[in-house]
Image (cartoon, rainbow, N blue to C red):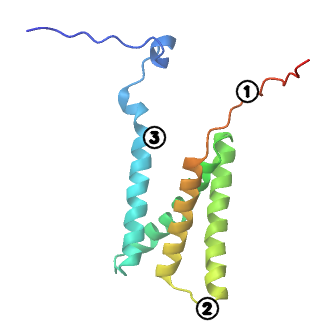
Amino acid sequence: MQTIRIKTSSTDPDQVTGTARPRSRRDLPALFAGAATAVGGVGATLALVDSGSPLRGPLTLFFLLAAPASAVAAALRGLDPFARALAAVAGACAVNMLVTQGMLAVHRWSVHGGIAAVTAISALLFLLAAVRPPRDRTPPPPHRRAE
């Protein structure tokens, strides 16, 4: 039997600093993001199918706050984490209030319509953040005039 040796990259931050974190600790943010997505999806589904479950209210509220907040946070990549979280929660509240006021103003309030509108606005914000090119933090070189 032959043994295959795999060389690790020298640019791995754990290798460079000499500190090795367990793999499970590095995977926690992705695990939490996946769990939040699943909980939000279940909440939206329970509300859209008019379920009588006692979890309908809390999970729907989680969806109505988490979906626009994560979309706003994706658009605010340049801020530090605390400012980004604060702006994302404020943006989520603003999106929910604007949807509610708009639907009440035209006398078309419904739970299904509100969830669909918040979902559409959140998806649009995610798409806009995804297609936006990353900003280059270095200043452009000075322009030289031909003499």
Label disc, if present, on residue 121 of the rendered structure: none
Q: Are circles 1 and 3 on residues that touch, CB within 8 Å?
A: no
Q: How many marks?
A: 3
Residue 55 in view in this figure: no
Label 2 element class: loop
Residue found at x 63% / y 67% = 95
Q: Is residue 23 left or right of residue 124?
A: left
Residue 50 position, x and y percent, is 37, 81
Task: Pinpoint residue 24: horizontal percent, then vertical percent.
Answer: 36, 32
Identify the element where label 3 is drawn: helix
Mark 1 or 3, closer to the camera: 1
Image position, residue 39 (x, y; %): 40, 60
| Quarter of the figure that contains the C terminus | top right
Distance from label 2 to label 3 (Cα)?
Answer: 41 Å
**Numbered label attached to residue 107:** 2
Do tag 1 and tag 2 residues touch (Cβ < 8 Å)?
no
Q: Which residue is mark 3?
A: 29
Q: Which residue is depicted at the point 61% across and 62% down?
A: 92
